[in-house]
Amino acid sequence: MRLGCLLFSLTLALGAIAQGFPSRQITIIVPFAPGSTSDLLPRAISPLMSQSMGVAVIVDNRPGAGGSVGAAVVAKGEASGHLLLMAPSVVLATSQWLYKDLPYNPQKDLTPVTNAATTPNMWVAHPSVPVKTMNDVIALAKTKAGALNYASGGNGSTSHLCGELLKAIAHVDLVHVPYKGPAPALQDVLAGRVPLMCDNFSNVIPHVRAARLRAIAVTALQRHPQAPDVPTADESGLPGFEINVWYGFAVQSATPKPVVQKLHDEIVKALRNPALAGRLDSLGLTVVGDTPEEFARFVAAESEKMRRLVHASGAKVE
């Protein structure tokens, strides 16, 4: 009898927590500089969430250390649900295997909410660089050993691991140039200051369409429907070369489950907005919107995959 009363009281308490949330402004921490997909997604859904939830939903960029600075803000912050993290794959699945001292523990400090969207990466080059295929890139790297640069959105990013994987598979010596996010890295590639980058499809495809960048290969096992003429790295002589990036949301691990569920429902509702869904599709993003439990299992599997990839590439960040 007492146990039944206790469970009933607990149910009422959890219901009250969910009903009372949100009680004030929600802040989405983006761990990279403005201008990339990590920034685009929160800014696209925040007005829709605000309208639905009746409170302001703002975006706060906290770049640095490959996303670790922003991730630590949420990991060490309040657990009320009013602080939300845009958590791409590097934050939840990769950095822990690269950095010796990470300021947060992705398994213990953060709770996955939902995987918003996913996209493959694409190798691109500035039009002035004499490469059109992955074989051209490899040949150029061999003639300019230790002198051919590639940009990335930061240590541990998928753009970084793309380069490390190419180095390991093709036995070439590329020079990694990390930035505080994909946007500033891409700006230097567009300006011709860095010749190559392997950035996510949604970031680079507008510039490929505008002929400001040359598409070399997609890092997926199948061609992308938004760029059917661009070959995969796999079919370009690099068997199994597959690196995708995904964009999730997470909260501090002690956040009550009803609040996590409510955030999930609101984020997925925004992602299903027809106008927004069409915009994301045009950028080559596949909307996911899975449950917190499904996303947690996905993160665990991706983390193990990234552990093997980092180990195979030999990449490390001191």
Image: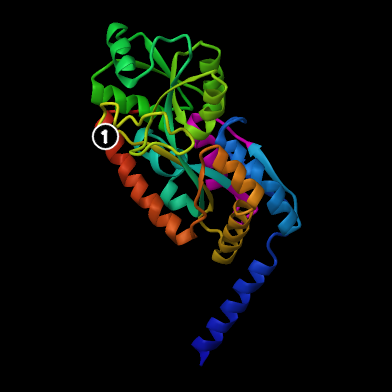
As rendered, which of 267 and 283 lies closer to the eye?
283
Question: Considering the image in quadrants, where does the C terminus appear?
Answer: top left
Determine which quarter of the picture holds residue 218: top left
Q: Which residues are magenta?
A: 61-84
Tell me: 190 left or right of 306. right
Alpha-carbon neighbours of circle 1 within 10 Å: few (<14), some, or many (≥20)? few
Determine which quarter of the picture holds residue 15: bottom right
- Residue 66 in percent (x, y) is at 48, 31
Q: Residue at x 54, y 64 (%)?
A: 257
Residue at mark 1: 311
Up-down: is 17 above or below 86?
below
Up-down: is 310 above or below 287?
above
SS for callout 1:
helix
- Residue 227 in percent (x, y) is at 46, 32
Residue closest to the far bottom: 1
As rendered, which of 135 and 33 lies closer to the eye?
135
Residue 27 visible in the current orientation: no
